[in-house]
Image (cartoon, helix red, strand yellow):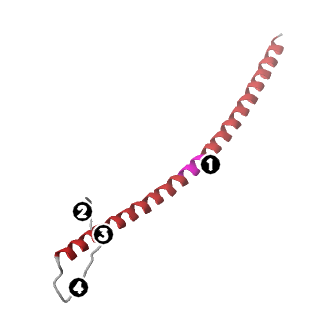
Amino acid sequence: VNEEIYGVVEIASMKKFAKYEIDFVKEVSEDLGSTVANAQINKRTRELSASAEQIRLELEKKEKMLQEIQNKLRLLETDLRSKNAEINSLKKSLKV
């Protein structure tokens, strides 16, 4: 299926190989190529999985930081509203 070459198998003999021997070597070579290809795919999958895990951990860390900042902003907003209410109350009392 995949026409990519992963290696070369060289076999020597003092006599001519029989057709069944050549066919056997071809079949074994294809199986070997498939095994190498699968090993490479599995390695790449593990690398991508590890990379995805690292990205997930970084995103979780940043999400936590953003939640902390959001909580601080809410506290500041509450404090600011309270101070604005206090200022408005003082303004009203000065107008009277």
Q: Are marks 2 and 4 in contact (CB under 8 Å)?
A: no
Residue 18: image x %, image y %? Answer: 17, 78
Residue situated in front as seen by the camera: 34 or 79: 34
Amino acid type, label 4: Ala
Q: Earlier in the sequence, mark 2 or mark 4?
A: 2
Q: Which residue, given by chain and number where applicable, does mark 1 sit on?
A: 61
Residue 29, compared with residue 60, is above or below; it is: below
At label 2, counting other C-alpha atoms closer than 10 Å, the crowd grade (few under 14, some 14-19, many 20 or more) is: few
At label 3, counting other C-alpha atoms closer than 10 Å, the crowd grade (few under 14, some 14-19, many 20 or more) is: few
Amino acid type, label 3: Tyr
- The local secondary structure at tag 1 comes to helix
* Label 1 vs label 4, nearer the camera: 4
At label 4, counting other C-alpha atoms closer than 10 Å, the crowd grade (few under 14, some 14-19, many 20 or more) is: few
Gap in angstroms between the C-alphas marked 3 and 4: 20 Å
Q: Is residue 10 magenta?
A: no
Residue 83, compared with residue 15, is above or below; it is: above
Q: Which residue, given by chain and number where applicable, does mark 2 sit on?
A: 3
Q: Is residue 2 left or right of residue 67?
A: left
Q: Is residue 40 left or right of residue 25?
A: right
Magenta stretch: dominant secondary structure: helix
* Quadrant of the rendering where the N terminus is positioned: bottom left
Gap in angstroms between the C-alphas marked 1 and 2: 44 Å
Residue 30: image x %, image y %? Answer: 28, 67
Residue positioned most to the top: 96
